[in-house]
């Protein structure tokens, strides 16, 4: 996951609507079912999906009153903890 991308997507959600991200995730998940996709292409699509889910989680915390910086830091700590496990 890339923090700059997640930050950008959080800003996009705040300026527009999270439904755009949700629908994009659904579209990208559908694309992953194409049998002719190469592994590298699946990796890129998967990375995009992960960043979008991350942005949705961060925005949810911001709506709950957590500062964006703290929400981003907490999210990245959770991701790092999951990777290190």
Image (tube, rainbow, N blue to C red):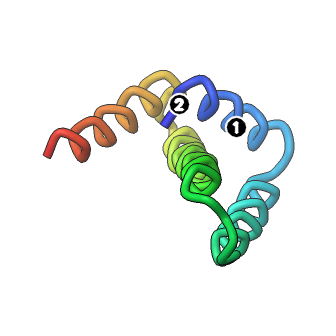
Identified at 64% across, 53% down, the residue is: 41
Quick one: SS at disc 1? helix
For marks 1 and 2, give the one nearer the viewer.
Answer: 2
- Residue 35 shown left or right of residue 13 in the figure: left
Q: Position of residue 23 (x, y in %)?
A: 77, 66
Residue 79: give its label.
none
The image quadrant that residue 8 belongs to is top right
- Between 9 and 30, the residue placed more toward the observer is 30
- Between 66 and 84, the residue placed more toward the observer is 84
Quick one: SS at disc 2? loop
- Between 25 and 18, the residue placed more toward the observer is 25
State the separation of the CA atoms marked 1 and 2. Answer: 11 Å
Q: Residue furthest right?
A: 16
Residue 2: give its label.
2
Q: Please, is residue 30 above or below residue 45 in the view?
A: below
Identified at 46% across, 30% down, the residue is: 72
Q: Count of labels shown?
A: 2
Q: Please, is residue 62 above or below residue 69 in the view?
A: below
Q: What residue does disc 1 label?
A: 9
Whether residue 7 appears in this view of the structure is: yes
- Between 35 and 21, the residue placed more toward the observer is 35
Crowding near pointer 2: few (<14 within 10 Å), some, many (20+)? few
Identified at 81% across, 51% down, the residue is: 17
Identified at 76% across, 68% down, the residue is: 27
């Amino acid at each position: 996951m890339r923090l700059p991308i997640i930050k950008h997507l959080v800003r996009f959600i705040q300026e527009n609507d999270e439904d755009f991200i949700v629908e994009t995730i659904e579209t990208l998940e559908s694309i992953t079912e194409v049998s002719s996709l190469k592994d590298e292409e699946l990796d890129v699509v998967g990375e995009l999906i992960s960043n979008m889910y991350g942005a949705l989680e961060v925005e949810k915390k911001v709506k709950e009153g957590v500062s964006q910086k703290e929400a981003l830091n907490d999210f990245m700590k959770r991701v790092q903890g999951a990777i290190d496990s």
